[in-house]
Amino acid sequence: QSALTQPASVSGSPGQSITISCTGTSSDVGGYTYVSWYQQNPGKAPKLIIYDVTKRPSGVSDRFSGSKSVNTASLTISGLQAEDEADYYCSSYTASSTWVFGGGTKLTVL
Amino acid sequence: EVQLLESGGGLVQPGGSLRLSCAASGFTFSNYAVTWARQAPGKGLEWVSSLSGSGGSTYYADSVKGRFTISRDNSKNTLFLQMSSLRAEDTALYYCARSPYCSNGICYTRYYFDFWGQGTLVTVSS
């Protein structure tokens, strides 16, 4: 199972919006509404921020939103804040009854 | 407070074995499916293995199939990962994570990991 494809890095200024893409295949991202996104700060455990493509867990800012089109899922962060600087990973359930993560995207807030 | 505390990591020679544990507290462990994921130093996350909420089904990444075994002891609120035939490429920080399964008596599979432990480091080297 190959990792989902994410850009290695993205950047934005405070207040701006950024989008991180996550590209898979019809056997994972495109085949299910089971894409989730995780935020990981340096030396910390991953934290769930989006699940089932578009849903936000309780306590997660509504500045985070998710979407999907065909085989590509996207995470959008609006009103960028310094505290959003972190690594972001997408994940999808697959047709093999396994899970696959993306390679991760480092977000820099300029 | 929800906690997942991994232990059992360490330095092991290639070909050796290690058993990781993940002690859960602050929630009803049996109501959750459980997963192991890993992160090699400076690298991204890799899903390793999951055990269904019912406990009847196990799933493994191709990279560990036949070498790793996931199990749980609900009476002790603990998840395990038995690792054998370890290779240098298994060197990583190993995380346990949970997925909701049963809530208010209704049980069904969810496909995300809503809480993660802090990880235990496994180093495979001679």
Image: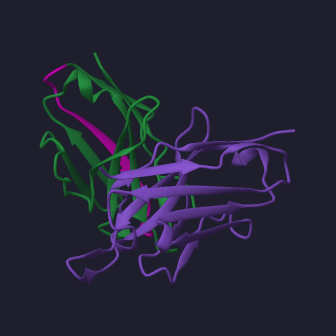
Chain colours: A green, B purple
In this view of the protein, which residue sits in the foreground, A89 or B114? Answer: B114
The vertical placement of A37 against B65, above or below, is: above
Question: On the picture, is A86 further left or further right than B69?
Answer: left
**Residue in the picture at 23% in, 82% down:** B105
Identify the magenta region.
A14-27
**Residue in the picture at 28% in, 48% down:** A74
Q: Is residue A26 magenta?
A: yes
**Residue in the picture at 39% in, 67% down:** B29
In this view of the protein, which residue sits in the foreground, B90 or A89? Answer: B90
- Residue B38 in the image: state x and y as whole percent: 56, 49
Q: Is residue A28 magenta?
A: no
- Residue A46 in the image: state x and y as whole percent: 40, 43
- Residue A57 in the image: state x and y as whole percent: 20, 54
The quarter in which the C terminus of chain B is drawn is: top right
Residue A76 is at least partly visible in this image: yes
Q: How many numbered marks does the figure carry?
A: 0
Q: In this view, which residue lies farthest toward the top?
A: A110
**Residue in the picture at 52% in, 56% down:** B22
Q: In this view, which residue lies farthest toward the front?
A: B75
